[in-house]
Every structure is written in C-alpha cells, then in structure tokens.
C-alpha cells in the first residue's frame, strides 16, 4: 500500500526514471551490438569498443529490469491517481444525489405519486444517513410546532423501521430532543 501511495504521488518521477533506465538500456544494447558487428567484420575499432563491453553488459543487466520496474511504478501511480479522482467524483455525485433525494422526500406530492420511493431506491446514502436526515426534518417540524411530541416519536420509529435502523437510536433521538428543550 505504501508503494502505491508513493507511486501515485510521484508519477512524473517514475516516468523520468523509466525514460532514463530505458536510455541506459538502449545505449548499452547499441554498444554491445556495435561491438559484435565490428568483431564480426574484424575491424580494428572492435578492440577499442571491447574495452567498454563490461559497461555495456552491466548497463543492459541493470537497465532492463529497472526500466520495467520504473514503468510498472509509473503505471500503478497513474492508475491510482485515476482511481482516486474517480472515487472523489463518485462521492461528490453521491452527495448531490443525496441532497436531491432529500428534497424529493420532503415533497408530499412526490410521496403521493411514488416518486419519493423511486428516488429512495436510487439514493446511495447509507440507511443510517437517510434516517438521520429524515429525523432531522421531523425534529425541525416539531420545533416549529408542526408535530406533537407523540407524533415525533411515532414518526421517528416509523423512519427507523423503514430504513432498517436499530431501535436503540430512538433513545438517542429522545435524548437530543430533551437536551434541545432544556437549552
């Protein structure tokens, strides 16, 4: 995981390393190939180029695996960046959808026509988050005088049942309301 984070944060560095190691490999392979050609032609320059043969071999032996490793890091980093960006976009879209769903849920006409139920099916918020939003709206209506305490408790229980949230949350809501009343 640590390597993935490093690669994501250093994609340009991994790309530069890939190019550098690829250049080292290419020069080493070209030098070794040149030496082989000159040696096959029995040219005098083969002995001069032969003195660099250990360096060409070392460059090839080190350059090729390092090129592959650096390229793999660059690819992993690029994929991690794309994945992070896509995840952020999904979270933003989910938040926007949650806000739209919250507005539609409040509309009595949408409830009557069944549009609210359709939106709830498309809503990506967790059941706890949906329940919290709906209970918050009920509490606002209670504070404004639109609901009695009994209606608030009943509707809160209904919301928790509809969303499949545990009943122990009712006591937390009651505790919040009592704290609000004392303030």
Image (cartoon, rainbow, N blue to C red):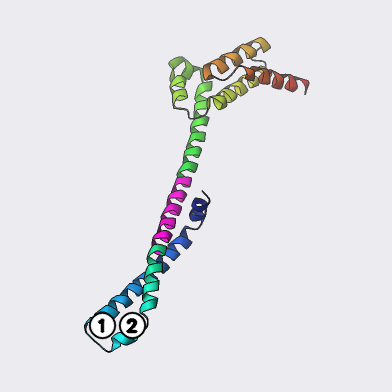
Q: Is residue 72 above or below residue 64?
A: above
Q: Are marks 1 and 2 in contact (CB under 8 Å)?
A: yes
Q: Main secondary structure of the magenta part?
A: helix
What quarter of the picture does the C terminus occupy?
Answer: top right
User: Sequence order check: which comes first, mark 1 or mark 2?
Assistant: 1
Q: x%, y% of residue 93? A: 48, 37
Q: Residue 66: name its quadrant.
A: bottom left
Identify the residue shown where x is 56% and y is 25%: 128
Q: Which residues are magenta?
A: 67-85
Is residue 118 covered in magenta? no
Q: Residue 15: name its quadrant.
A: bottom left
Q: Residue 173: name its quadrant.
A: top right
**Disc 2, SS:** helix
Identify the residue shown where x is 63% and y is 20%: 169
| Mark 1: few/some/many CA within 10 Å (<14, 14-19, 20+) | some
Q: Is residue 82 above or below residue 117?
A: below
Query: Extreme bottom residue here?
Result: 44
Is residue 74 covered in magenta? yes
Please indicate whether residue 40 sits to the left or right of residue 85 in the image. left
Query: Extreme top residue here?
Result: 150
Query: Extreme right residue here?
Result: 182
Q: CA distance from mark 1 to mark 2?
A: 9 Å
Q: Which residue is mark 1?
A: 39
């Amino acid at each position: 995981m640590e390597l993935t984070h490093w690669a994501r944060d250093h994609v340009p560095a991994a790309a530069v390393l890939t190019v550098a190691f690829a250049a080292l490999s290419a020069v080493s392979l070209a030098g070794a190939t040149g030496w082989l050609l000159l040696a096959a032609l029995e040219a005098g320059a083969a002995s001069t180029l032969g003195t660099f043969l250990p360096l060409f071999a070392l460059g090839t032996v080190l350059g090729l695996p390092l090129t592959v490793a650096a390229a793999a890091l660059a690819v992993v980093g690029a994929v991690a960046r794309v994945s992070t960006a896509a995840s952020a976009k999904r979270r933003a879209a989910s938040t926007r959808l949650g806000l739209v769903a919250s507005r539609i849920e409040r509309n009595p006409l949408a409830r009557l026509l069944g549009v609210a139920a359709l939106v709830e099916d498309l809503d990506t918020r967790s059941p706890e988050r949906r329940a919290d939003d709906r209970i918050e709206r009920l509490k606002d209506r209670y504070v404004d005088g639109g609901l009695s305490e009994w209606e608030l408790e009943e509707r809160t229980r209904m919301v928790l049942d509809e969303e499949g949230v545990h009943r122990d949350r009712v006591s937390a809501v009651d505790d919040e309301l009592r704290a609000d009343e004392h303030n």
